[in-house]
């Protein structure tokens, strides 16, 4: 699994990357994973999971806080405009590492449960579905049913 760690300056990216590398090396299932501190987002984001560091560390209460807030807002905007899904990681010291490890485990569990065939498409309540193929099938079936009733 390829994991990107992003965050505003002073959010502890390097510390978290180091802690995650150590933790993942100890996990035999995740030993081949790569954790990278990403400085700038690329249009072709080659990562399976992106972790964004939250602004909850104590040092963010300083005068540089407004700069950190602007950097964080800019980063979130870039992630959004590039349609890059991300998970925000909070906590201090080991709690932050644990939060990141939970996000990694959750992402890994989701990736193993994803359907591998087109026949096993995602299903949702019709009121909230935005699947164009599903809508087409639904309305086509209704039109056929209406036409058969008229005859």
Image (tube, grey):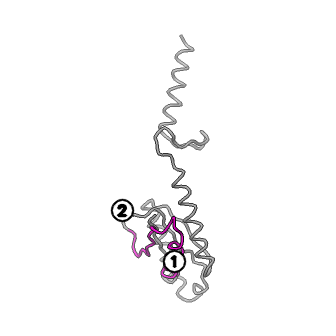
Q: Secondary structure at mark 2?
A: loop
In the rendered image, the residue lying farthest to the top is 151
Q: With respect to residue 146, does 43 lie above or below?
A: below
**x, y (%) of residue 71?**
47, 77
Instruction: Return the residue nearer the eye: 118 or 131.
Output: 118
Q: Which mark is residue 44?
A: 2
Q: Residues within 10 Å of mark 1 (few under 14, many from 20)?
A: few
In the rendered image, the residue lying farthest to the front is 28
The first of marks 2 and 1 along the sequence is 1
Question: At 41% from the left edge and 76% from the top edge, which residue is drawn?
Answer: 39
Question: At 55% from the left edge and 19% from the top edge, which residue is drawn?
Answer: 146
**x, y (%) of residue 90?**
60, 74
| Residue 35 occupies quadrant | bottom left
Residue picked out by circle 1: 22
Instruction: Return the residue nearer the eye: 26 or 15.
Output: 26
Q: Residues within 10 Å of mark 2 (few under 14, many from 20)?
A: few
Determine if the magenta segment contains residue 78.
no
Q: Which residues are magenta?
A: 12-41
* Residue contact at pointers 2 and 1, CB within 8 angstroms: no
Question: At 53% from the left edge and 73% from the top edge, which residue is drawn?
Answer: 26
């Amino acid at each position: 699994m390829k994991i990107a760690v992003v965050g505003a300056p002073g959010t502890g990216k390097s510390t978290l990357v180091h802690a995650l590398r150590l933790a993942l090396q100890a996990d035999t299932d995740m030993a081949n994973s790569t954790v990278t501190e990403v400085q700038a987002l690329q249009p072709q984001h080659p990562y399976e999971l992106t972790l964004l560091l939250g602004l909850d560390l104590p040092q963010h209460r300083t005068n540089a806080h407004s700069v950190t807030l602007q950097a964080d807002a800019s980063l979130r905007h870039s992630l959004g405009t590039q349609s890059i899904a991300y998970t925000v990681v909070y906590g201090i010291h080991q709690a932050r590492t644990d939060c990141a490890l939970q996000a990694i485990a959750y992402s890994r569990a989701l990736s193993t449960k994803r359907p591998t065939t087109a026949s096993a498409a995602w299903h949702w309540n019709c009121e909230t579905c935005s699947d164009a193929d599903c809508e087409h099938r639904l309305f086509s079936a209704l039109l056929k049913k209406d036409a058969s009733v008229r005859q």
